[in-house]
Image (tube, rainbow, N blue to C red):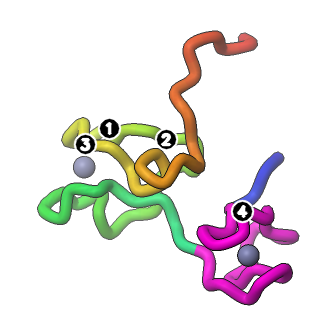
Amino acid sequence: MLYKRCSKCSASAKEKDANFCSNCGQRFEENHCSNEECENNKINLDKNDCYCFKCGKKTTYFIKGYSQVQTDLPF
Ligand SMILES: [Zn+2]
Ligand SMILES: [Zn+2]
């Protein structure tokens, strides 16, 4: 399983609860809804989520290119 990605150098976190990148020291960000009026703006979404399931706006990870829309799911 993949953990959070660094917004600066794209290195993956070593642990699920890591707060800082071990490669460059950048603080990890959580995936949120990009809509500031949406309650999911303050809630951590799944890192693979591309769109908010409440309001349909793009997630911060999707905007930054960390998560991608999956069209061909393996299951
Ligand atoms: Zn980094
Ligand atoms: Zn939302």
Reading the image, the residue beneath label 3 is 57
Separation of marks 2 and 3 at Cα, in angstroms: 11 Å
Residue at 77% x, 84% y: name it: 24
Residue stretch rendered in magenta on the structure: 5-28
User: For the residue with label 3, is its CB less than 8 Å from the closest atom of ligand 2?
Assistant: yes
Instruction: Please give the label number shown on residue 53.
Output: 1
The tag earlier along the polypeptide, 3 or 4, is: 4
Residue at 52% x, 67% y: name it: 30
Reading the image, the residue beneath label 2 is 49
Name which quarter of the figure residue 38 lies in. bottom left
36 w.r.t. 22: above or below: above
- Closer to viewer: mark 3 or mark 1: 3
Separation of marks 3 and 1 at Cα, in angstroms: 8 Å
Check disc 2 and give the amino acid type. Asp
- Closer to viewer: mark 1 or mark 4: 4
Labels 1 & 2 near each other (Cβ < 8 A): yes
